[in-house]
Structure formats: structure tokens, C-alpha cells
Amino acid sequence: MLILPQTRGWLSVRIFLRAINQLAELSDIVFSQGDAGVHFELMARPSRDIARVQLTLDEQNLDYFNQMESWQSFTWPGNTYYPGVSLSWRSVSSGMQLYASHQGNWGFIRLLDEALITPLDASRTQLVWITADGNPLKFVMRSELGDGPLALLKLQGFTLPTAIFNVAAGTEGVE
């Protein structure tokens, strides 16, 4: 463990090291196989008044009809020329409706950002999206490595310090 002096000149170094550690934790999840990618599983859960839920992630499909739940494997980003995600549902009284559609490699992360996220245990997390008519679209995500793709939400607002060493702060009182 590196002990840094408690002077203002070292504050930037501590902030920088904290940021680098955060990136290292994310890289352990995202680059675990060498290439960028996260492997995880999703299971749709039943919801009252919801008859069907469809999730398409980078051309990988989960189609749930409110019957026996099962885990489905996903990889993000997927191996496709058309990356993106869409989430649709059908209630017991309506046709298919689109909850969200986000194109591009980061579309899935944008969809995750819209979810109500509840950790269930060390490897499982409940994701819930609330439709315009108040119905919950429920999923459980499990990942073998940390938070899986949810770890990327920690990049929101991430910044590195503009300077690592503050020379002026370290020279106070020197004449």
C-alpha cells in the first residue's frame, strides 16, 4: 500500500490513483477475455397485466410469454454490424408497444441507465422498467464477473484530474 503525504500537493495524486483504480476494476470486467465484451445472462420475470416481453440486444433475442422463466446468455457488445437494443411489451389488453430503442454500441448501457436496479445477491440483480401505463417489465441479470454490464454505469460523470502533481502547492513556505 502506497502512503502519500498529507499535503495539498499530493491531493491530485490521490484523486488520480483513485480514478485509475476505478478504471482497473472496470477493465477486469470488460476485458476479462482480452477483447472488450461482457458475458451475462438475463431472465424475464412475470408481471401482472404483461403478456409478452421482447428484448433485442445486438441481434440477440429474448422473447418471454409469461410462462416458465429461463436464463438466456448474452454478450455485449454483440458481434453485429447493427448494434443497438430495443425493449417491447404487450399487455393483456393491447398490442406490442415499444418501451425503448437505442441504436449504437452504447444503446444497452443507456437502457440499463433507465432501469430501477436492485441487487439481489453477489451475482444477481433485478432490473425493472416501468411502462407509461405503470406496468413493470422485470428481468433478473446474473454475471460471473462483478456487476457485469452494470459496472459501466459507474463511468457516468467520470473524470481524471486535470493535473497529477500540483507543484505550486508543494512549494508553500519555500523561499
Image (cartoon, grey):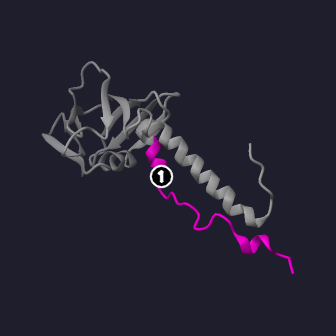
**Which residue is rendered at x = 37% and y = 38% of the image?**
35
46 and 69: which one is in front?
69
Q: Would you say 171 lies left or right of 50 here?
A: right
12 and 86: which one is in front?
12
Residue 26 visible at all = yes
Residue 46 visible at all = no
In the picture, the quarter occupied by the N terminus is top right
Q: Which residue does the numbered mark 1 point to in the structure image?
A: 155
Q: How far from the left and from the top, in percent, is residue 115?
A: 38, 44
Give the vertical position of 123 relative to 112 (above or below).
Answer: above
Taking the view exactly as shown, the residue that stands out farthest to the top is 68
State yes or no: residue 155 in magenta: yes
**Which residue is rendered at x = 59% and y = 47% of the image?**
21
Label 1 neighbour load within 10 Å: few <14, some 14-19, many 20+: few
Q: Would you say 105 lies left or right of 140 here?
A: left
Which quadrant of the figure has residue 125? Answer: top left
Circle 1: element type: helix
Of helix, strand and loop, which mostly describes the magenta segment? loop
Q: Would you say 90 lies left or right of 14 here?
A: left
93 and 47: which one is in front?
47
**Which residue is rendered at x = 39% and y = 31% of the image?**
141
User: Which residues lie in the magenta part?
Assistant: 151-175
Q: How far from the left and from the top, in percent, is residue 119?
A: 49, 34
**Which residue is rendered at x = 57% and y = 67% of the image?**
162
Taking the view exactly as shown, the residue that stands out farthest to the left is 95
Q: How far from the left and from the top, in percent, is residue 102?
A: 25, 51
Q: How far from the left and from the top, in percent, is residue 83?
A: 23, 46
Q: Would you say 34 lies left or right of 24 here?
A: left
Tell me the kind of residue under disc 1: Leu
State yes or no: residue 114 in magenta: no
